[in-house]
Image: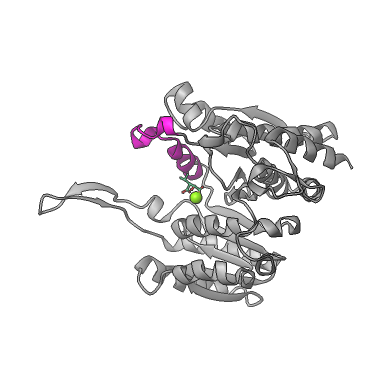
Amino acid sequence: MKIAVLAGDGIGPEIIAQAVKVLDALRRDGLELELEHAPYGGAGYDAHGDPLPEPTLKLAKQADAVLCGAVGGPQYDALPRAQRPEQGILRIRKALGLFANLRPAFLFEELAGASSLKPELVAGLDILILRELTGDIYFGEPRGWRTNARGEREGYDTMLYSESEIRRIAEVGFQAALKRGRKLCSVDKENVLETSRLWREVVKDVAKNYPQVELSHMYVDNAAMQLVRNPKQFDVIVTGNMFGDILSDEASMLTGSIGMLPSASLDANNKGLYEPAHGSAPDIAGRNIANPLATILSAAMMLRYTFNLEAAARRIETAVKKVLAQGYRTADIHATEMRRVGTGEMGDAVVVALKT
Ligand code: IPM
Ligand code: MG
């Protein structure tokens, strides 16, 4: 079982180091994992002038799974778009065909007080946002800048989904719903967009094969509102790349901190890239204060989805729950009376909890 580890930039290396600690602990218990590191994002640019250097992509293709930290930093903001760290993420998603992005918003009950919503609104929250990841306005052509007839500059992008792209993400959505609460909410903007009109029609068609799943449709603006009004109405949400980007950030806050949220991006064969849902937080990089739990939980998702090691995945998740119950908190989820710890101490605490 080979894992490509791409730590990236900002807090990436610190949080990845904690996930590696946890995986190393499992290796000592006999799990045969092989880890290989490679530069990516701004670090890729620094090393090879490219946010997704050829050797890194090669490694990612060879490996069974990819574990990523985060990318980006102010020192790269002025680079031409092709060299920007974000292009590293977008290109690796596309190159590996990682079209299904799973972003669970799950509340550890210990953190109910850290949510931006009242505890009773989020107690027991367990939503899965399934975001299509390789299509939509992120990748649609044509795109660019041009000068219009009045001599004014225009920027334009193309929102585009093919029927097969919609069908395969809808399938993943129904399958995921079957394994959970059997409710699927498809989010679109069908009242305005042609893309969404096709999206809704295809999702309805796929639904014919899943009579056990209760399907609903919701406009994205309403979904954004419902997520903060009554988030527990949702089980699985399936949506396009752009809407999913926005709604998953929103949903993350319900669980206390974006620092808690893992993600999986899967291809058709469950090869996957696993990364925290948050960014590289350059403002707090290198200060040992970032929350490593989203990355550690991403490693758990990796064991579950790519390696089919449900028991090992559970073991990590249980250990995370245990450290939270013991009162360990990084700054983002800290509350009075709790044991405030740094990134490294949180990783150590999870390793200890694995054994007990
Ligand atoms: C995410 C991020 C990326 C995205 C950026 C960094 C390109 O926001 O993974 O949600 O928009 O997909
Ligand atoms: Mg995002």
Q: Report whether 106 appears left or right of 165.
A: right
Quarter of the picture containing the N terminus is top right
Q: In which quarter of the image is residue 22?
A: top right
Depth check, front residue: 217 or 204: 217
Name, please, the residue furthest toward the right: 356
- Stretch of the chain drawn in magenta: 74-94
Q: Residue at x 43, y 28 (%)?
A: 50
Q: Residue at x 49, y 73 (%)?
A: 218
Name, please, the residue furthest toward the front: 336
46 is higher (above) or lower (below) than 8: above
Q: Report whether 157 appears left or right of 128.
A: left
Q: Residue at x 54, y 57 (%)?
A: 248
* Residue 326 place in picture, x, y as percent: 82, 47
* Residue 296 place in picture, x, y as percent: 70, 42
Name, please, the residue furthest toward the left: 150
* Residue 306 place in picture, x, y as percent: 68, 46
Q: Residue at x 41, y 69 (%)?
A: 189
130 is higher (above) or lower (below) than 59: below
Quarter of the picture containing the C terminus is top right
Depth check, front residue: 267 or 302: 302
* Residue 133 place in picture, x, y as percent: 49, 52
Task: Examine the rendering and report whether any part of residue 162 can be seen.
Answer: yes
Check residue 79 for magenta coloring.
Answer: yes
Magenta span: predominant SS is helix
Depth check, front residue: 334 or 162: 334
Task: Examine the rendering and report whether any part of residue 107 can be seen.
Answer: no
173 is higher (above) or lower (below) than 330: below
Q: Report whether 138 appears left or right of 212.
A: left
